[in-house]
Amino acid sequence: MRRWLFFFGLALGWCHLIAQDKPLMRQIPDYSFAHFERNHLIFPGDSTAMERFYQKMDSVIFFGQGNVSIMHIGGSHVQGGVFTQQFRDNLLSISTDLIGGQNFVFPFTAGKTNNPSHFMASYTGEWTYCRNAVRRETDKRMGLAGAAVTTTDPEASISIISRERYPSDLTPDFDFNKVTVIGFSETENVVPMLSYDGSVIQGEYDEWQSTYTFQLPDYTDSICICFGSVEGEFTLTGILLKSGMTGISVHGVGVNGASVPSYLRCDDFERDLNLIKPDLIIFGIGINDAAEKDFDKETFKENYGELINIMQRVNPDCALLFVTNNDSFKRIKKKKYEVNPNGKVVQQAFMEMAKEYGAAVWDQFDVMGGLRSMQAWEKAGLAQKDKVHFTREGYKLIGDLLYNALIESYMQHVRQNKKR
C-alpha cells in the first residue's frame, strides 16, 4: 500500500510540474547580440551524478522529504550576491514549501567590503580582515568562506539579518532557530555569545570543527554575536543559520579576486564544507585565473582537480556544474581595454573537465555572445565599464539564464521518468 501511494504521489507531482512547464521558466529579454537560444546544460560525458541530484529534487519537490544543498562558488560575481540570489529565488518560486533549512554566510561588512545582497550585516568595534585572494602570508586560518575577520575589541559585535530587503513577491523570508559560529581564539577567555531578545545565550563548543552552536528558543530572522570580554583575539570565519526545514538551500561562497588557488590556500575549507555537504556544486571560479599574465590551461585544470577532490571526499555523490567565464576585457591603460582571449581557453578547459569528472557545463561564454560580447552587454546597460563585472540587472539576467538551463534539464528528467 505504501509503495502504491509513493508512485501515485510521484505521478501526481510529475503531472503537476509538466503542466506548468513554461510558467516555471523565467522570461528572458531578446538581445540580438546574445545566443539565448543555446541556453542549455551541456553534458560532454556521463550525466549519472546530475541524475542522482535530480532524484533528490524529486523527493523534496513532490513529497516534501529530505533537503537539497546547493553551493555556488566563485569570486566577485558571487560575493556580490545578486547572481546567486536570483538563481535561488527562482528555484524557491517553484513551490512555497521549498525554503531550505540552512544558509552559510560571512559578514563581509566587518571587513569594510561589499556584503552579499541576500542578507544584511553590521558590526561594532574594530575588526581586521583578510581574504584568500591576497597572496601575502597571513597567520589567520581560513575556511569555506575564504575570508576571516579578527577582533581584540571588547565592544566588538556582528549582527546578521537574513530577511530579504529587495521588494519581490517571489523572495521568501528565511527564519532560523539554530546558529553555528565558526571561529577560533588563541585563549580560552574569548568566547562568542549570542545576544537575543534581551538575554545572552551560551553556545556549545565543538573543538574539532571549531564551532560554537546556539539553539534559540524561537525562530528569528536576526542575531547579534558578541563577547563577554576579550582578553586576546577572536577570529570569525563563517556563520551557518539553520531552521531544520525541508527544502532547497543555496549557499553563495565568493570572495572578490578569488581564483582556484585562493580556495586551495584555505586550510579549513574541507572541514567547513562538511557543515553543508552540497548535493550540487556550481563552479564559477575562473575569471581571475584567466586574467593572469601567465595563465596556463593545464595548470588551471590541475588546480581545479585538487579542489574537486576535496569536494568529492566530503560528498562522493555530489553533482558538479561548471559555469564558463563571461567574456571580459583587460585594461591596458586609462580608458583603453583589450579583449581577454583566455575566455575561449577556459571554455575549452571546462568542457574537458566536465567530460573527465562526469559534470555538466553551463556555457555562459557562448550564451552571452562569445568573444567581445561584453561590449554589447555594457552598451545595453547589463555590464559595468570595467567590462568584467555585470550591473545589477545583468547579474539578475544571468541568474535567470542559469536557472532556466537547469530547470529545462530537470524537466527532461521528469518527463523521462513519467514515461517509465
Image (cartoon, grey):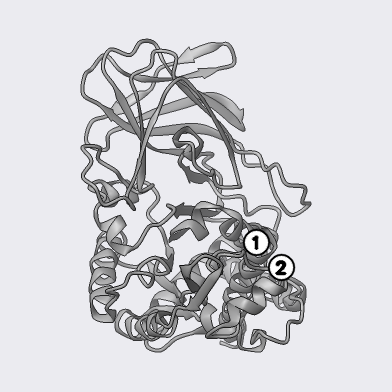
**Labelled pair 1, 2 in contact (Cβ < 8 Å):** yes
Residue drawn where x is 52% and y is 65% of the image? 334
Label 1: few (<14), some or many (≥20) within 10 Å?
some
Q: Secondary structure at mark 2?
A: loop
Question: x, y percentage for residue 321?
Answer: 44, 73
In the visual, does 408 lie left or right of 205? right
Residue 209 in which image quadrant? top left
Q: Is residue 83 above or below residue 325?
A: above
What residue is disc 1 on?
A: 391
Image quarter where the C terminus lies is: bottom right
User: How many neighbours does mark 2 have within 10 angstroms: few (below 14), some (14-19), or many (20 or more)?
Assistant: some
Give the residue at x 47% y 74%: 325
Quadrant of residue 22 in the image?
A: bottom right
Residue 83 visible in the shown view: yes
Q: Secondary structure at mark 1?
A: loop
In this rendering, position of residue 43 left or right of residue 396: left
**CA separation in Å, label 1 and label 2:** 7 Å
Residue 67: tell me if it is visible.
no
Tell me if residue 237 comes above or below residue 413 in the rendering. Answer: above
Q: Nearer the viewer, residue 46 or 19?
A: 46
Residue at 23% over, 41% down: 138
Q: The N terminus appears in which quarter of the rendering?
A: bottom right
> Which quadrant of the view contains residue 278?
bottom left
**Residue flagged by tag 1: what amino acid is it?**
Thr
The correct choice, above or below, for 92 with respect to 237 in the image is below
Q: Nearer the viewer, residue 205 or 32?
A: 32
Residue placed under numbered mark 2 in the picture: 381
Compared with 197, 206 (above or below) is: below
Residue 168, position in %: x, y? 77, 51
Please name the amino acid that badge 2 sits on: Gly
- Mark 1 and mark 2 lie on one chain; the one further toward the N terminus is 2
